[in-house]
Amino acid sequence: MAITRRSFLKGTAGAGVASLVGPSLLVSASAKAAETDGVWKVSGSHWGAFRARVWAGKVQEIKPLEVDKYPTDMLNGIKGIIYSPSRVRYPMVRLDWLKKHKYAAETRGNNRFVRVTWDEALDLFYRELERVQKDYGPYALHAGQTGWRQTGQMHSCNNHMQRAIGMHGYSVKKVGDYSTGAGQTILPYVLGSTEVYAQGTSWELILENSDNIILWANDPVKNLQVGWTCETHESFEYLEQLKQKVADKEINVISVDPVKNKTQRYLENDHIYVNPQSDVAFMLGLAHTLYTEDLYDKKFIDTYCLGFEDFVNYVTGKTKDKVEKTPEWAADICGVSADKIREFARMLVNGRTQLLFGWCIQRQEHGEQPYWMGAVLAAMIGQIGLPGGGVSYGHHYSGIGVPSTGFAKPGSFPLNLDQGQTPKYTNQDFKGYSRVIPVARWVDSLLEPGKVINANGAKVTLPDIKMMVFSGNNPWHHHQDRNRMKKAFRHLHTVVAIDFAWTATCRHADIVLPACTQFERNDIDGYGAYSGRGLLAMHKLVDPLFQSKTDFEIMTELTRRWGRSEDYTRGMTEMEWVKSLYDDCRAANKGKFDMPEFDEFWEQGLLDFGKGKPWTRHAAFREDPEINALGTPSGFIEITSRTIGKMGYKHCQEHPMWFEKTERSHGGPGSEKHPYWLQSCHPDKRLHSQMCESEEFRATYAVQGREPIYINPTDAKSKGIKDGDLVRVFNDRGQLLAGAVVTDSYAPGVVRIEEGAWYGPLNEKIGAIDTYGDPNTLTMDIGSSELAQATSANTCLVDFEKFVGEAPPVTAFGGPIEVS
Ligand SMILES: Nc1nc2c(c(=O)[nH]1)N[C@H]1C(S)=C(S)[C@@H](COP(=O)(O)OP(=O)(O)OC[C@H]3O[C@@H](n4cnc5c(=O)[nH]c(N)nc54)[C@H](O)[C@@H]3O)O[C@H]1N2
Ligand SMILES: Nc1nc2c(c(=O)[nH]1)N[C@H]1C(S)=C(S)[C@@H](COP(=O)(O)OP(=O)(O)OC[C@H]3O[C@@H](n4cnc5c(=O)[nH]c(N)nc54)[C@H](O)[C@@H]3O)O[C@H]1N2
Ligand SMILES: [Mo]
């Protein structure tokens, strides 16, 4: 049964709407029974919008909504999230923390928990909030980490947590995110906006005008499967057209990547293999050719850019390093021959060229540089602001490039306090510690409170955090270097985790509160995160399982403990909130789009705004750079940035540069000891750690019950490893077990373990082997540079061997060890 359903969905992916069966949109979604027993309800998720057949209080079947013409097979994982053996069933408290009435931090992670009532759990949570505010102050509480909470605007769990905690007192917050930390920090200095989250040139115009498309570290076919709001996969229509144009030789598409990724396998386009982490050297070689062969666009540089001369001095070896960045120099580092580099440079200026960067290359040490250098390269090509030309940093994400309708979307449950409301504790004395820290530096804070670091032109004093609250994120997946985290967590008195899945974060928490899944509550969301295509009703499919509650209910009960629950809820119920978010949206669109009454919308399940109009990024700036100046200090594209230069940082100077990495494969530092580059890219069959708990679905890709490690055949052979073998992967930071998948899509010296694999340490001891295969057991926890201080997850070398002997059982799943 499960297999049939899976192959059914697989078959429909890409097949077009006609082949999809489902009840008519005009039929009441909640009232009519379909083919089999039960009712069909509309809802949506990061993986897709869908209809679910609910019968006997259980979700029986899920199929894509008709508007989604390119559904992903991850829809098959959803039932397994709801009915996972790893669900958090009851409020739980860590045994040693409770027993000793102090923190017993050294046994944190032993996964021994006691079941308590909701009242007991929330009383303890409140007691700890009080204690931290009274004994220390706002600097000792960090409740600002964020993540990929489920879809739905009313139940945005991060907003619920922050608003509720905010009603109690102030706390430490973060700046930036793990996705684009380096990119979003550097690009405002260069192009005047973060670029990474901006709407991009419409795919229509790219398909019409581009002669060359460079997919630089970019795998849209994999990464567009999930979206920030309820996803309907609009971009795939364009990718399908692109595939045709590649076949017809109308557009020359080249992937620059150390692996043959899913997009390349789909499009069957050309590939330039580049050594990992060496893109800046490659690009400098290209710039050298464009300059010395006089191929670059001088007029564009003169009209729209600042500081080209200083950069050219660096390229031609006239700056203090005295190294000319010739193609021969670049070839040594990047592995692309000097001739190929020259050829590639000439191709870039032969016709209209669109550079499309993915985000992975800025999630590495000096991750600011490839993005800055990408902008410089685009400036030299001279097509920024033309349809099908220039540079984009987002076409692989959440439907960027699908034209925007411009209609208002529903707002969300408020993150902040309402006007005039104040917290119970108004103390804002952070005792000299910073109240905002770079998102990925919180573990540094636990290890070295009081340390002063550079960040984006400022000094940050890492706060002395005693308590952390996590909701809608999973730091024991998302952060780097598990064993370092284990040490760091000993500094914490109290950790609260609110989740529906018993993640490694719950395992390392003291108080665990069971939230329900999005499928157990009513909500509203937009679909088409960038296109603003329409609105989706997220009907509750089943009641909250076990003792779980919505985050809204949890925080209502928490804030009641200091008399603020009415402030928090504004006296409204879940459905009153959902309706009010819809009504506000309706009012905002009044006169532009006639939205029906709420009840009608709710019954129909979705509202389609239609298609938006094609648009070209940076066209206005190109048209008139004075009137439509960029948001950079000068208003121009800053090839050289005086502002950054004045910061005096070693690894982010006044223009883009090549810096050697702390660890780099293919002959770079550390490669004698640990020769293989581990890339921890985003998973093809999950959203980070979400859905890893979905058992049947996990079984479709796991190898001997472990997370796959992808290895090139030559490397596998040299280690005596066959497809399907268990492998121990290690470096000086940690070790894990994974299952070998041997494939020539990966270059020699390159291995991949996808991020989000659940951490399952054998025990709580530092150095214990991870039994399932979380790549962050091995990654390095350093800031990208003094500028962004972003994650450097993809600067990571490892070695591996065939695992012999009796393999330990996988400890990652199935919840806590319950102690009575
Ligand atoms: N090595 C390596 N590490 C990486 C990356 C990488 O490329 N390599 N990528 C990084 C990136 S880009 C990102 S964005 C991060 C992602 O990191 P996260 O956003 O932390 O990852 P998720 O697995 O999505 O975690 C979301 C958690 O929230 C829970 N949750 C979901 N909805 C709700 C809800 O409604 N209520 C409550 N209470 N809980 C909910 C889920 O069960 C899950 O445990 O990972 C980063 N880490
Ligand atoms: N299915 C799925 N889709 C997702 C997500 C998910 O979890 N699952 N997460 C979403 C989120 S939060 C984010 S942030 C984005 C992430 O989007 P990205 O960061 O762009 O995605 P990745 O898959 O990590 O990497 C993309 C490509 O970069 C290549 N690459 C890595 N290092 C290098 C390098 O040094 N040089 C070159 N030239 N190429 C390199 C990889 O081989 C890979 O093909 O994806 C989003 N989409
Ligand atoms: Mo991300």
Image: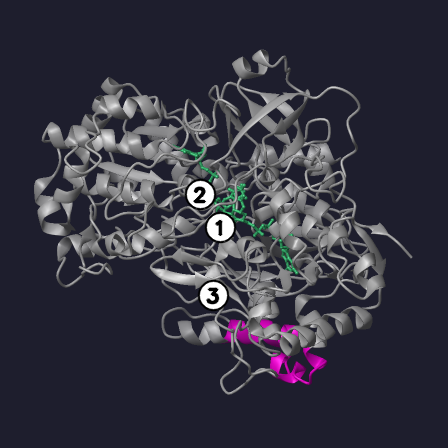
The residue that mark 1 highlights is 178
Is 564 inside the magenta-drawn segment?
A: yes
Q: Secondary structure at mark 3?
A: strand
Which amino acid type corresponds to the residue marked 1 in the rendered image?
Answer: Tyr
The residue that mark 3 highlights is 436
Report the residue at 42% width, 67% height from top.
408
Is 507 inside the magenta-drawn segment?
A: no
Q: Secondary structure at mark 2?
A: loop
Q: Residues within 10 Å of mark 2 (few under 14, many from 20)?
A: many
Question: Residue 33, percent across and down?
Answer: 72, 54
Report the residue at 59% width, 64% height from top.
465
Q: Tell me which label, 1 or 3, sits earlier in the chain.
A: 1
- Mark 2 CB within 8 Å of ligand 1: yes
**Which stretch did the figure color magenta?**
559-583
Q: Secondary structure at mark 1?
A: loop
Most extreme residue toward the right, as rendered?
A: 820
Q: Which mark is residue 363?
A: 2
Which amino acid type corresponds to the residue marked 2 in the rendered image?
Answer: Arg
